[in-house]
Amino acid sequence: MSETALEYLLGSATRPATLAALRDAGRLSSRRLEERVSASRRTLKRTLRTMESRGWVEPVGGAYELTALGAATLATYEQCRERERIAREIRPILEHAPASAFGLDIETLADATVIRPDSDPTAPLDRLLDLRAEASELREAAPFLLRDTVEQLADRVTAESPPDVTLVLEDAAPSPESYSGAYCDHFRDLLDAPTVDVRVVDDVSVTVGVADGHAFVGVAERDGMPGALLESDDDTVVDWANRSVDRYLDRGVPP
């Protein structure tokens, strides 16, 4: 028994299936187990013998039943597999975000949506523009604002019924030497709008924000191009995103 419990269960699909069958159906004979897990009699016999030695199952009256230890072990295994599945789904975000910027339990992201730039490089930005388009309140921390974002926000905050916008940026003073004249003009309109509050910090590693109760996280690829976007309306994720923006605001200074 040199293998850990997780190593042992990961070694064969028959092993977790055996525990799951006993959990779901209760006490089962070897024959019934064989039917449920689609394993050979020899394989199942060996599996049950090992599980009995580990204290996960117990023979009772010619059948087997799951012990409390076996149930706890199976639950841990299933949780591990679920967390791994979620991490795999949101890998385009996680692999470009430092751990310090992503203090969120991964299980809260089980239903999150990830928009990837694989087939359509503009898809993440297009979706983010959609989220901002009708929002009456936007709170966002970002390393910088892309041209489309600046144009959209400048148009919205200078129109009737402008949204309340809170921005925390690394760069809130674009210069004509680095940006187009149109970008700088739109940015000044944004800064001058009465419903916009801008703060500056020096280390925004990922884009994080909330648009009308809808959380989003955006990352950049290693070449600096916009990468994937994660979005979620889960209350826990929205609360985390708001707190993330608040932490930046606490350190931010006026531009």
Image: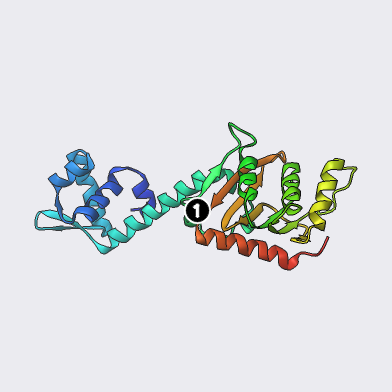
Q: Residue furthest left?
A: 61
Tell me: 170 left or right of 177: left
Between residues 40 and 102, which one lies in front from this camera angle? 102
Between residues 225 and 157, which one lies in front from this camera angle? 157
What amino acid is at disc 1? Leu
Residue 81 x, y percent position in the rendering: 41, 49
Could you tell me which residue is drawn at 18 percent across and 43 percent down? Answer: 34
Q: Is residue 139 visible?
A: yes
Image: 209 above or below 14: below
Between residues 90 and 8, which one lies in front from this camera angle? 90
Q: Is residue 171 visible?
A: no
Task: Judge the density around disc 1: few (<14), some (14-19), many (≥20) Cα neighbours within 10 Å.
Answer: many
Image: 95 above or below 55: above
Could you tell me which residue is drawn at 81 percent across and 54 percent down? Answer: 172
User: Can you say which quadrant of the picture contains the C terminus?
Assistant: bottom right
Could you tell me which residue is drawn at 37 percent across and 57 percent down? Answer: 76
Q: Residue furthest front?
A: 160
Residue 163 x, y percent position in the rendering: 68, 57
Residue 12 x, y percent position in the rendering: 32, 42
Judging by the rendered image, the residue that carries numbered circle 1 is 109
Between residues 170 and 124, which one lies in front from this camera angle? 124
Residue 20 x, y percent position in the rendering: 27, 51
